[in-house]
Amino acid sequence: QAFKNNYTNIAVVRNPYDRFISMFKDVKRRGEIFSLHDHDTVDKFLSYLEKTPNRNRNLHFKTQKSFLYDNVKCIDITDEDNLHLFLNHPIPHKNSIDDKVVLTDDMKQRVYELYEEDFTYLGYTKWLKY
């Protein structure tokens, strides 16, 4: 029904690397909510995601493409001009966690392989220097 209205339907999306780091920080902070108690390293969390098919993952860990339709305008969360144009207000970052997470080249490759359809569909590039 929402797609048949006369409005522009939008989805706020994130760079898959940024999104993965945010997911990992959230799992470290609130792992029990996701039934993930022993995933306190990036490697353990990546291994969990690699073993779990996208369709069986917690909603928060699925690909963004899983939720998108062709007639939805995707706006990156860092695109403040377009967000303001369509939403008229900023999106608050309430779950900001200061822990620095560094991804090795191997980890970046694994994130890319897990979320390749997001990189492709949303037009993000595979960054080697992230």
Image (spheres, rainbow, N blue to C red):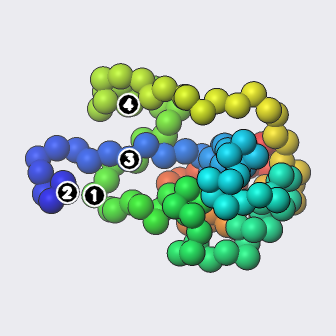
Residue at 63% x, 58% y: name it: 34
Secondary-structure class at tag 2: helix
Q: Using the rendered view, name the quadrant where residue 14 is placed.
A: top right
Q: Which mark is residue 71?
A: 1
The kind of residue on which mark 4 rests is Asn
- Which-is-in-front pick, marks 2 and 4? 2
Can you say which quadrant of the picture contains the C terminus?
top right
Q: In this view, does 91 lie to the left or right of 42?
A: left
Q: Is residue 93 left or right of residue 9?
A: right
The residue under label 4 is: 82
Dot 3 alpha-carbon crowd within 10 angstroms: few under 14, some 14 to 19, many 20 or more: some
CA distance separating discs 4 and 3: 11 Å
Mark 2 or 1, nearer chain start: 2
Q: From the top left corner, tell me how far across and down residue 48 is, in percent.
A: 75, 68
Disc 2 + disc 1, Cβ < 8 Å = yes
- Which-is-in-front pick, marks 2 and 1? 2
Q: Which mark is residue 3?
A: 2
Mark 4 or 3, nearer chain start: 3
Q: Using the rendered view, name the quadrant where residue 81 is placed.
A: top left
CA distance separating discs 4 and 1: 17 Å
The residue under label 3 is: 11
Residue 53 visible in the current orientation:
yes
21 is higher (above) or lower (below) than 126 = above
Mark 1 or 3, nearer chain start: 3
111 is higher (above) or lower (below) than 51 = above
The kind of residue on which mark 3 rests is Ala
Q: From the top left corner, tell me how far across and down residue 30 is, in percent.
A: 68, 46
